Amino acid sequence: MMKPLAVLGQAVNKNVIVELKGRREYRGVLDGYDPHMNVVLRNAEEYHEGKLTRRLGVVLVRGDNVIYISP
Amino acid sequence: MMKPLAVLGQAVNKNVIVELKGRREYRGVLDGYDPHMNVVLRNAEEYHEGKLTRRLGVVLVRGDNVIYISP
Amino acid sequence: MMKPLAVLGQAVNKNVIVELKGRREYRGVLDGYDPHMNVVLRNAEEYHEGKLTRRLGVVLVRGDNVIYISP
Amino acid sequence: MMKPLAVLGQAVNKNVIVELKGRREYRGVLDGYDPHMNVVLRNAEEYHEGKLTRRLGVVLVRGDNVIYISP
Amino acid sequence: MMKPLAVLGQAVNKNVIVELKGRREYRGVLDGYDPHMNVVLRNAEEYHEGKLTRRLGVVLVRGDNVIYISP
Amino acid sequence: MMKPLAVLGQAVNKNVIVELKGRREYRGVLDGYDPHMNVVLRNAEEYHEGKLTRRLGVVLVRGDNVIYISP
Amino acid sequence: MMKPLAVLGQAVNKNVIVELKGRREYRGVLDGYDPHMNVVLRNAEEYHEGKLTRRLGVVLVRGDNVIYISP
């Protein structure tokens, strides 16, 4: 069995999809995370309703709004 | 009597349905979970309003949005 | 006086109605519960806006969304 | 001065109105409560938008959704 | 400087307005309160969208939904 | 670096804007605050969607609904 | 690996974007932060749905509503 946060540990320095409420999605390289599922992405892209809406060099995404994170 | 989280313990390596708020559903093989109902699924499929919308190799679904989990 | 969770203790192995936000209702035999009002039902049926929408052998319903539980 | 939960202590075995979010109201005899404002009612009636919608012999109403409780 | 809850301590036995989310307002004499801003009012009146909708002899209003309390 | 709550400490006895969810705004002299961002204002004015809707001598505004506070 | 809050530590005295729920955005120089993601900005600008709506000399933005913070 795998502890959920271990998935994040294995995904550091790899591309991840972070899906948030409100049809927002952030894609980038996982730089860090904490037990609240706050995550840091670099080379990040924001998508809203499937469209690329913003590029963000580094972004700290708050864990509260996360629906899922997928490596 | 069965403690609720024991249902998840018995479902590891089996197919589960994870129903979330917002008419989202994730189906896949349960790889792990924690007491917040954060779950890890592999070979996962996302359904939105009953339609298959995405395939995700591995996905960490945040427990906050869970309505139910069914093995 | 009866402590609220004691109602659940007495309802184990009996039929219960679990009413959730969003006009969802789960009916089945109570298998277990915890202090967060997470409950396990077996032989469960889901109703949405009063219509039977799904049958679930075993289901773990998250306590967060509960409006009421009635034995 | 009266501590808020003391109001519930004095209302045990008396009729109370439990008003919830979403224009739901439960009326019945208060059987028990806890510090989260979870309450148990017996001979309970559910009203939705002012109309009687269900009778429930015993019901455990989750405190999270309470707007007010009035003896 | 005044600690916020001290405002409530000074308002006991005086008229207060308790404004809640959803355009609900409760007016009455403050009988008690606790650190969660749960309050007890006596001789209370409920207003919804500015109209008097109910009179309640004693009411325990849950602090969660409070926007403000004004003596 | 300034700790967020220190901004409030420096603003005591000065005019502040307290912006809440739901397009509500409270303006007045800051009388007190606590770590939950509950604040007490005196000589307060309520604005809704930019219009002055009420004057409140003293008001305890619950921190939960705060978007920002600006001295 | 980088701990999420460390991103904020490195951004002190630099320009940041603070994106909130409800299509609100605050831009300014980061003066401080705490583990709840409450942040203090100076020379701040508020944008709503992409339009500049207010200038705020100093503003304490509550962490609860944060979607992301980007240096």
Image: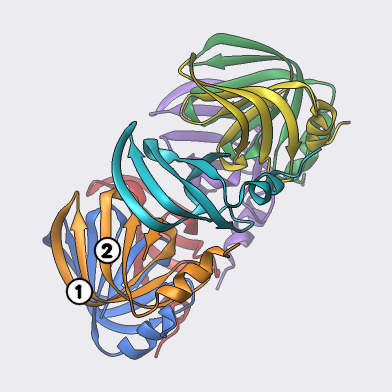
Chain colours: A yellow, B green, C purple, D red, E blue, F orange, G cyan
Instruction: Confirm whether residue G17 shows in the render.
Output: yes
Give the class, few, some or many, for how many residues have Cα within 10 Å of label 1's Cα (few <14, many ≥20): some
Q: Residue E23's x, y, as percent? A: 23, 55
Q: Quadrant of residue B54?
A: top right
Q: Write the residue at 51% across / 13% down.
A: B50
In the image, what residue occupies the spot 35% across and 64% down?
D68
Question: How far apart are the alpha carbons under marks 1 and 2?
Answer: 10 Å
Q: Residues within 10 Å of mark 2 (few under 14, many from 20)?
A: many
Res E71 label: none
Lower sequence index among marks 1 and 2:
2
- Quadrant of residue D29 within the rendered picture: bottom left
Please tell me if label 1 and label 2 are on a single chain.
yes
In terms of depth relative to the viewer, which is nearer, D14 or E67? Answer: E67
Quadrant in which the N terminus of chain D is drawn: bottom left
Looking at the rendered image, the quarter that the C terminus of chain D falls into is bottom left
Q: Residue furthest right?
A: A1
Which residue in the protein does label 1 denote?
F56
- The chain containing the residue under callout 1 comes to F
**Where is G41 relative to B20, above or below?**
below
Residue E15 is left or right of residue B68, and the answer is left
Q: Residue D54 placed where, x, y %? A: 35, 45
Q: Residue at x 76, y 46 (%)?
A: B3
Mark 1 touching mark 2, by CB under 8 A?
yes
Q: Is residue C15 above or below residue E36?
A: above
Q: Which residue is mark 2?
A: F26
Q: How many marks?
A: 2
| Residue type, label 2 | Tyr
Q: From the viewer's perspective, is the residue at label 1 or at label 2 nearer? A: 2
Residue E70 position within the rendered picture, expressed as x and y whole percent measured from the top left: 26, 76
Kind of residue at badge 1: Leu
Instruction: Tell me which chain the residue with mark 2 is part of.
Output: F
